[in-house]
Amino acid sequence: MLIVLGIVVLSIVVLCVFVRYIGLRTRNGRLRATVVVLGDVERSPRIRRQAVELVDDDWEVTLVGYIEPGSKLKDGESIDGFTLRNAPYGFVVRARGIMYFALAGLAAIYRAFALLVLVLKLPVQDVGKLLEKNFPCVDLDLTQKITHTNLVSLQIFLIQNPPCIPTFLVVIIAMAIRHPRASLVIDWHNLAYTIMSSNPRVPAAAVRLAKVYEQVFSHFADAHFSVTNALASFLHRNFGIANVAVLPDRPSPMFRPGLALPESLRSSLGSDIIDGRGALAISSTSWTPDENFSVLLDALPLIDRQLCAPAGKRQMPSSLTILITGRGPLRSQFEEKLSKLSLRKVTVKTVWLRYEDYVACLSASDFGISFHVSSSGLDLPMKALDMLGCGLPVLSPSYPSVSELIEDGRNGLLFNTPVQLAHHITVLLCDWPEGEVLNSLKKTAVGWFAEPQDKWRPTWLATARPVLRGLVEEKTLKGS
């Protein structure tokens, strides 16, 4: 472990010398923010929307993150897009114990170098030449041409956490080298070390080290945003961070009730769904360990048994189709287990949808199911937010902070076991399609974010804008 830490420290020193050698200059200009997410930009709606709000507030914005080939920044051409490709993690995922830690450390160095180059905002031409000549192992892809060749003085770094390794340290180094008067703001979605702890391959010592890293370097930030009140309280109580503003998530205006099912899916879902005799449920996932789909696998036979039972006085749908959208490492494992089930009236389809089709499918479904199990108990199921935006009641695992978004019996139902999940779904399907429980939950869900103050923009203007503008004014007064 000490060897790996030594490699990391040495690499950072080399990077600092490298950047000093380049000798770039800055010039004064408009308020400027660099928004950093060491993840898939297209699947990080919250941080992208923060970037859009900054642009609307007359900031010059650069967005840094991973973008897959063929993807675009959909939020506007006024945002400069610096993108980098991830390190090849196949060999890391298969490793165990200390070997996993060592390889993950090398991958982190890879990411640290690529990120440091970008947050220091090298001109496009220089990035390509320098890396091709001196660092051919780093694969960078710039999706948009940056038209300016001089740097603009930077006021704000806004970074998403998780992940914090190596983001915190890299941005702090960039600020020390090139932007000593800039302010650092961390947008907390969860706790990075708790996500690491949910991976059985990661040694306990690495998790403890990651917690110390996250706690220590978070104190370099000038301000913090938190997605929940529970997370803000934790940061204050356990990390000693006082200046945390709660910036709750809100659904994008794209997510709204009443959209039609995409034509590309109508034929594959069958006539039962099209004519309303069958029920359609939807779930969205990244197929990662923090989503417990084993609960669904155990619940499916119970649900199928209820649908196949004699109806009696209750009217049940002719079938139930559960559409699971997304891609990720655990999808094939789920599909293998699903294929072994013998189901007559329940169909589960795993698909990958374009963003527009995903939105339409949510809107056209009868209810949504989230399987997000928080590693910290302090974050929110983001896909449930999309579902509520489309007016869908949401079934979700119960954990401490989920009540900040889903109120049991009002806009959704909470479960802990397969039996509870099967029971909730059966109750929703009773007296189809005019069941009292389903329609009551739908009515509440449709109005959940209906008020103007519940939209993202008013929330951002009331919470984030004063914090960011205040930081700039404070640094300006200190520097004058």
Image (tube, rainbow, N blue to C red):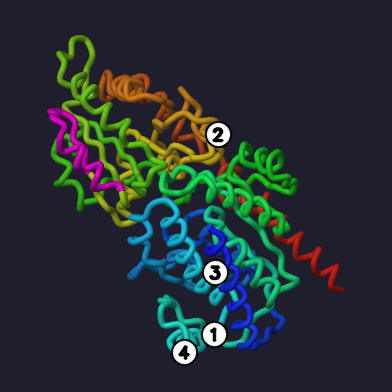
Q: Which numbered marker is on residue 59?
A: none
Magenta-colored span: 330-349
Q: Give the mark toward the camera: 1 or 4.
A: 4
Residue 151: give x, y in percent of width and height.
63, 82
Amino acid at the residue labelled 1: Pro
Residue 373: give x, y in percent of width and height.
44, 37
Question: Of helix, strand and loop, which one carries label 2?
Answer: helix
| Magenta-drawn stretch contains 48 | no
Tell whether 99 sits left or right of 366.
right
> Residue 342 occupies which quadrant of the picture?
top left
Residue 14: give x, y in percent of width and height.
59, 78
How far apart marks 1 and 4 lie (CA) works out to: 10 Å
Mark nearer the N terminus (1 vs 4)? 1
Amino acid at the residue labelled 2: Ser
Amino acid at the residue labelled 4: Lys
How far apart marks 1 and 2 lie (CA) works out to: 43 Å
Disc 2 crowd rating (10 Å Cα; few below 14, some 14-19, many 20+) is some
Q: Residue at x 71, y 55 (%)?
A: 219
How far apart marks 3 and 2 lie (CA) works out to: 39 Å
Q: Which residue is denoted by mark 4 in the rendering?
A: 129
Q: Give the mark toward the camera: 3 or 1.
A: 3
Tell whether 145 sits left or right of 234.
left
Residue 177: give x, y in percent of width and height.
69, 76
Q: Are marks 1 and 4 in contact (CB under 8 Å)?
A: no
Q: Give the mark toward the camera: 2 or 4.
A: 4
Mark nearer the N terminus (3 vs 1)? 3
Q: Which residue is denoted by mark 1 in the rendering?
A: 123
Q: Which residue is denoted by mark 2 in the rendering?
A: 401
Q: Is residue 432 above or below residue 380?
A: above
Mark nearer the N terminus (2 vs 4)? 4
Amino acid at the residue labelled 3: Ile
